[in-house]
Structure formats: C-alpha cells, structure tokens
Image: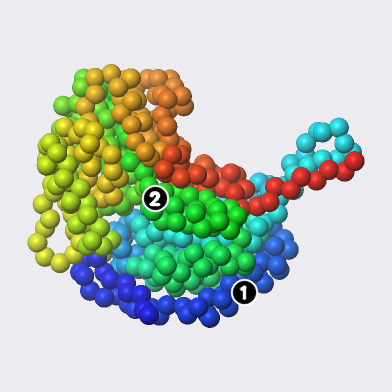
Amino acid sequence: MVMQSVNPATGKLVAEYDEHTPEQVSRILETSWARFESWRRVSFAERAALLRRASEVLESDKEALARMMAEEMGKPLAGGRAEVEKCAWVCDYYADHAERFLSDTHIEAGRTKSYVHYEPLGPVLAVMPWNFPLWQVFRFAAPALMAGNTGLLKHSSNVTGCALAIEKVFRDAGLPEGCFTTLVIPSGAVAGVIESPEVAAATVTGSEGAGRAVASKAGEMLKKVVLELGGSDPSIVLDDADVALAASSCSVGRLINSGQSCIAAKRFIVHEAVYDEWLELFTENMAAAAVGDPMDEETVIGPMARADLRDELADQVTRSIEAGATLHLGHKIPEGPGAFYPPTILTDIRPGMPAYSEELFGPVAAVIKVSSEEEAIEVANDTEFGLGAAVYTSDLARGERIAARFIEAGAVFVNSIVASDPRLPFGGVKTSGFGRELSELGIKEFVNAKTVVVA
C-alpha cells in the first residue's frame, strides 16, 4: 500500500510513500526499545548537545521545511518559517532546562533521606495531525528525548513527507538510530503498535475520535496517554475593552494557520455595548486577509489541507444558516482548483446551531452578542470543549479574575490570542483532553516519579 501527499492548492500529487509492512514495524519497535535501553543512560549534557544540534539543523533547513509544509498541507510560507523557528526554540528550551526539571525532588519525611527520582518510561508513540506538522511533533519529541525516552511517530498520512523530514532532522543532528523513528502506517495499525510490549506510552494531538480510540487502547493495555484534542475557543470582548485591539487580535486569532488550529479563536462573545463597533472593525480585518497560493509571500490564508475538510466546514456553515444564523461575510467557495475557503463571519448564533456547538476548523467566525459579563462567561463555558480562551478588557484585574476563576479551559489569555509557548503548560479539560505538554509539567508526563526512601 502507498500513502499519497496531494498539494491542496492545486490538487496535484506531490509524492507517494510505501507503507511500512508489519515486519518492518516490528523491527522498528524492537530497535526503538533497544535504543531506549542505552539512550536512558546517556547524560543530560550529551542529550542536550544533540538537541541543540537538532535546533541548528532546523534553522539551516528552514526554507525547505517551510516549502514542504506549503506543498503538503497548504501552510503559507511565513507561517511555515515561524513554525520551524518555534521547533528550534523548543529543542533549545529543553536542552537548557531538562536536567533541572528532572533533578531529584527532596522531601522531608522524618527519614534519613527521602526524595522523588525521575526515570524515563521507554518508547513513546505520538499520533499527530497535519495542521502543524512539525510543531506538534517537536513539542512532544524534545521533552521526551531529553527525559531519556525514545520517540515513535505516526503522522497524518497527507504529511508523510514532513514526518520523514522530522526523522531526518534528528538523524542529521547525530541522534543514534532508533531514538526517533517515523512509522509510515495507516490509522488502523495504531492499535497494534500500542499493544506492542516495546511501546511504553502514547500521546495524541488531534480529533476527539482519534483521542478516544488511542486512549481506549492505551487504557486496555494500562499504558500512560496524554491527549490534546479539539477546541472551540471563546474570545470574550467586554464592555470596557479596547475595541480596536480586540478586533485586530480576534481576527489574527481566527485566521492563524488559515483557521486550522485547535487553539484558534472560534467563538466571539461580544458585549452589546461594543458589538457594532467591534463587528465593523473585525469584518474589515477578516475581509482584508489575502487568500491565495501558500507559496506567495503575500498570502495570509492558504487552502485548507484537504478538499473534504473544506467541504465539511462549508456544510457546517450552511446548516448554521439554515438554522437561523446570519451570513455576514464569506462562505462563497471560489472557482478553480484547490481547497480554498474564504474568511467567513456568522452572526445571530444560538444554541443548537453547528456554529455554536461544533468546532469550526477553518477561517469561520461565530459571533454571539451578550448583555452582561455573567452571560458572556455562561456562553463561553457552554461547550463540551475546554482548550483555550481569551478575555478582552481595559481592566486587567477584571480580566485576570474572569480568566483564573470562571473560564473552564486549559489556558486563558487576557488581551491577546491564545498561543503555545515552551515555557508554559499546554493542554485542555473536558473533551479537549487531559495531561499537559510543554514546560516542566510536559517533560514529567512520560517519566516514572519514583519515591526513594532511606530509613
């Protein structure tokens, strides 16, 4: 069997890749486990030197990697370059901090000595999506490798080229064979990999369905799993917000990665006192975003990653309009090749509409008018998701109070878009998943926190 990579801007075939056979998968898993047995004993200093070298390889290969992302999933070049730079950052970050994060934690317990010692678990399987084909992988791989684990990647089939390029980055950086390996396998083969005794744990970034499937199998096998799933992130614009700032920030948050981001702003909950002014500015910003060839430096919004995803999004918009939403901007699919979809705004959103309750994974904004802070909070939390959220207000104490005490999400940002950062924990609640990536919390997800007591 082969996997195909298709350019979503043109519909033309980019490349075909032979899937790994069951025998090849078995050898890869055996090699990963054997490498773990030696890699776990490599010093933090040696691991850090190799991760810093991976950062250098990423920077030197930045242009080629950005172009590969543009070809395979339609990411505009500027976004691709920024993604590569962020991957280099996370490698450097864990090279600098992993040893301190995993140093023994001493605890006074009335004994001669008592402490927590952190040890790696083994090969970690990552099941990753196409929307940030490098960043999603490196934010798992950098901490996992620095902790002494080895990495196995099952990437989305439409970005197989990126998956193999990631493996090459680590190989070019000098990491030994088996430290990080890409499995070119279909989704149906993932359960068998998790069942393998050579796999210690799993991590998933992707849809709720993918998360449930992997978590179910990992639970059956009593293996650790971390899930970072979908989101329908609310952005609350309060009556005292800086309206121009809020409109600008909200449009950037909605259109980042052509709207295909789990933490992209998706639902805009706007106080009636500033609604008209905000909507006018927001509409101007959305309408001005250039849609086109991701290889064009002026492009802000490239195609969606696949035509079927574009069609699914358009259907959600159509069903919302049929249920009473008002089409304020967009929704007209352009003629010609490519999975393009224009910036779109829906207003008069109410419960029961797809735009209210479902994740809109593309450049579509669902706008909801509210009359009070309390109603804004209620609407923001009226979702099965809980990944990120934003609050816009001129009163920072008010924004912090709402963010810290009242919004049900893994991260809440005041007066800016939600963004991942190697220094900050990343993850969600409710059906957005569980566990954390990045920061000190992220590197401790895939280690054994061993209690050692000397009487």
> Which of pointers 1 and 2 indicates the residue nearer the eye?
2
Residue 433 horizontal/vertical position (percent): 46, 45
- Find residue 235 and name its label: none
Task: Identify which amino acid the numbered label 2 is placed on.
Answer: Glu
Tell me the quarter of the picture where residue 188 sits. Answer: bottom left
**Left or right: 404 in relation to 361:** right
Residue reaching furthest to the front: 220
Q: Secondary structure at mark 2?
A: helix
> What residue does disc 1 label?
30
Residue 383 horizontal/vertical position (percent): 34, 36
Q: Residue at x 26, y 75 (%)?
A: 13
Marks 1 and 2, the one that precedes in the sequence: 1
> What residue does disc 2 label?
208
The answer to whether one can see residue 170 in this image is no
Residue 442 horizontal/vertical position (percent): 56, 47
Task: Identify which amino acid the numbered label 1 is placed on.
Answer: Glu
The answer to whether one can see residue 161 in this image is yes
Residue 86 horizontal/vertical position (percent): 45, 54
Q: Residue at x 30, y 59 (%)?
A: 75
**Left or right: 350 in relation to 125:** left
User: Marks 2 and 1: in contact by CB < 8 Å?
Assistant: no
Q: Up-down: is 404 above or below 51?
A: above
Q: Residue at x 37, y 60 (%)?
A: 130
Please tell me how crowded label 1 is: few (under 14), some (14-19), or many (20+) other residues with Cα within 10 Å.
some
Q: Secondary structure at mark 1?
A: helix
Quadrant of the frame with the C terminus: top right
Tell me the quarter of the picture where residue 151 sits. Answer: bottom right
Q: Nearer the viewer, residue 217 or 308?
A: 217
Q: Nearer the viewer, residue 104 or 1?
A: 1
Spatial CA distance of label 1 from label 2 is 30 Å
